[in-house]
Image: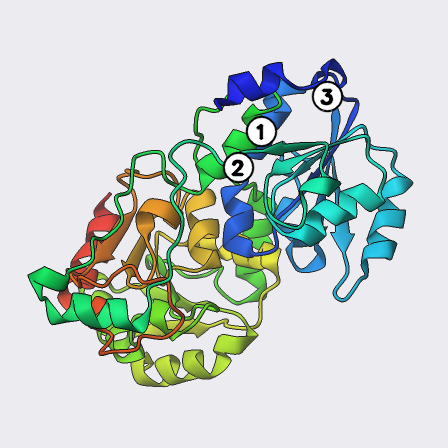
C-alpha cells in the first residue's frame, strides 16, 4: 500500500496533532539516518510540539536540531513502567514509533497515547493503533550463512548465490521517511543533517589544543562497534595515514569511543613522529565535541560506523572501506553524493552482514592502501 493510501485510511484526529512523540532509535548511525524523516515531520506539522524519546547516550545529538522541540531521555537500565509513566505526564496526541522492536511499541502503549503508528512486526502490532506494512522496495539485510559464503568464495558458477539487488530507494532513510509519509509528510528524501555551532567548534578546538593548527585537519576513525568484519585492518590505516600525511602535511585527529582506546594507542605509536602531527582523542570527547571535531575535519577516513554518519551529516566528506555491510543500504548521506568516496572490493560474498568473517576477510583486504590514499587526497581536492 502506498503511503498516500495509508494516510487516507487514518483517522482525521491523527492528521492534526498538537503534541507528537517520536520514539527514536537506539544507535548513533541509525539516529542520524532518521533526521530526514524528522525534518519532513516538522515540515508537515509546523505548529505541533515534537518530542523525541531517545536513549540517554544519544541525548546530546539532538541539541539545537530544528525538527525537535524537546528530548526525553531513557536512562540506561530504565524500565518500561518508568518510561510509560514519564510519557503519560506529557499527554501526547500521537506517537510515531521508528524502531521495530516490541519494547518501543509497548512504551507508547503504556503511555496511553491515543494514536500509535509504527511498522507492523510480530509481537507488537496489538500495541499500535495503526501498523504500517513494509514499504515497496524494502530490502532486508540478509545475514549469509557460512555455507553460502563458502560457496560464493569458491567461485563455482553452478553453486553461485546471487547478491541482492539494491534499488535507488533501498537506503535506510527511506524506511523512516515512509513512516512519516503515512502521516502526510513529503516522502522525498533529504540528506541527513545535524546542527553544530561555530562556538562549539571553537571550544572543542581550544579544549584539545587544536586551535593553532594551520595544516589541513583530517580525521581517522579506525574502530567499529558492530564487529571486526566492518574494520579495515589497522596496519592499512597506519600505512594510508603515513602516506597521506607525507603528501599533504596534514594533522590527524584520531577519533573513537572508549572501546577503541587500545587500537588508537597502537595507531598513534605507529604513525607519530617529529615530522607528523597526530592528536589521539579516542575516548576523550563528548558526543557534541565529537560532532564539532568532525565538522572541523576536511575529510574523515573511517569504517562504516556511527561517526561516519555524523561526519556526513555535519557536512564533512568521508572515505569509507566497506566490507560486510552495504553502502546502498546504510551508506553516509544520500546514495550518489559525490562528496563521499565509498570503497568496495570485488569479493563475491559481500555484503554478508556478519560480525566476523568466517573465511579470509577478502572483502576488506581487497581494498588497497593505494585506493584509500587516492580517495582521501581526492576528497581534499573536492
Q: Which mark is residue 14?
A: 3
N-terminal-most mark, 1 or 3 = 3
What crowding class fits label 2: few (fewer than 14 Cα within 10 Å), some (14-19), or many (20 or more)? many
Q: Residues within 10 Å of mark 1 (few under 14, many from 20)?
A: many
Mark 2 and 3 residues: CB-CB less than 8 Å, in contact?
A: no
Q: Residue at x 59, y 48 (%)?
A: 100
Disc 3 crowd, CA 10 A, few/some/many (<14, 14-19, 20+): some
**How many numbered marks appear?**
3
- CA distance for labels 2 and 3: 18 Å
Please tell me the numbered disc located at residue 310.
Answer: none
Q: In the structure shown, which secondary structural element does the residue marked by tag 1 occupy?
A: helix
For image coordinates 45% across by 30% down, the residue present is: 190
- In the picture of the structure, the residue carrying the numbered disc 2 is 176
Residue ID for mark 1:
180
Asked if residue 145 is positioned above or below residue 381 in the image, the reply reads below
CB atoms at circles 1 and 2 under 8 Å apart?
yes
The answer to whether 55 appears left or right of 30 in the picture is right
Percent x, y of residue 118: 63, 37
Q: Dividing the image into 4 quarters, which one contains the C terminus?
A: top left
In this view, the residue in front, 28 or 360, is 360
Would residue 184 be visible to someone looking at this image? Answer: no
Label 1, label 3: how far apart the Cα atoms are: 12 Å
Amino acid at each position: 500500500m502506498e503511503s498516500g493510501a495509508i494516510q487516507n485510511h487514518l483517522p482525521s484526529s491523527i492528521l492534526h496533532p498538537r503534541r507528537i512523540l517520536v520514539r527514536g532509535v537506539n544507535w548513533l548511525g541509525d539516529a542520524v539516518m532518521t533526521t530526514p524523516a524528522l525534518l519532513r515531520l516538522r515540515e508537515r506539522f509546523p505548529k505541533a510540539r515534537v518530542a523525541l524519546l531517545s536513549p540517554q547516550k544519544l541525548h546530546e545529538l539532538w541539541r539545537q536540531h530544528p525538527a525537535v522541540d524537546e528530548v526525553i531521555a531513557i536512562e540506561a537500565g530504565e524500565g518500561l513502567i518508568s518510561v510509560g509513566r514519564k510519557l503519560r505526564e506529557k499527554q501526547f496526541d500521537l506517537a510515531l514509533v521508528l524502531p521495530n522492536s516490541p519494547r518501543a511499541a509497548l512504551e507508547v502503549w503504556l503511555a496511553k497515547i491515543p494514536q500509535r503508528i509504527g511498522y507492523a512486526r510480530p509481537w507488537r502490532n496489538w500495541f499500535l493503533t495503526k501498523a504500517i506494512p513494509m514499504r515497496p522496495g524494502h530490502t532486508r539485510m540478509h545475514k549469509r550463512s557460512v555455507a553460502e559464503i563458502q560457496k560464493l568464495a569458491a567461485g563455482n558458477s553452478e553453486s553461485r548465490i546471487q547478491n541482492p539487488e539494491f534499488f535507488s530507494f533501498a537506503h535506510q532513510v527511506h524506511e523512516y521517511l515512509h513512516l512519516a509519509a503515512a502521516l502526510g509528510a513529503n516522502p522525498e528524501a533529504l540528506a541527513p543533517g545535524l546542527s553544530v555551532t561555530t562556538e562549539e567548534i571553537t571550544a572543542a578546538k581550544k579544549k584539545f589544543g587544536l586551535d593553532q593548527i594551520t595544516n589541513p585537519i583530517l580525521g581517522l576513525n579506525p574502530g567499529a562497534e558492530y564487529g571486526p568484519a566492518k574494520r579495515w585492518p589497522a596496519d592499512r590505516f597506519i600505512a594510508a595515514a603515513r602516506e597521506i600525511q607525507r603528501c599533504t602535511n596534514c594533522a590527524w585527529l584520531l577519533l573513537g569511543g572508549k572501546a577503541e582506546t587500545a587500537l588508537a594507542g597502537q595507531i598513534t605509536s605507529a604513525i607519530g613522529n617529529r615530522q607528523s602531527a597526530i592528536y589521539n582523542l579516542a575516548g576523550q570527547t563528548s558526543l557534541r565535541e565529537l560532532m564539532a571535531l568532525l565538522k572541523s575535519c576536511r575529510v574523515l577516513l573511517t569504517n562504516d560506523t556511527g561517526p561516519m554518519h555524523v561526519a556526513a551529516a555535519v557536512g564533512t566528506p568521508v572515505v569509507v572501506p566497506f566490507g560486510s555491510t552495504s553502502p546502498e543500504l546504510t551508506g553516509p548521506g544520500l546514495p550518489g553524493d559525490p562528496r563521499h568516496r565509498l570503497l568496495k572490493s570485488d569479493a563475491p560474498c559481500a555484503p554478508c552482514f556478519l560480525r566476523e568473517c568466517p573465511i579470509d576477510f577478502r572483502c576488506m583486504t581487497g581494498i588497497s592502501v593505494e585506493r584509500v590514499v587516492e580517495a582521501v587526497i581526492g576528497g581534499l581536492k573536492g
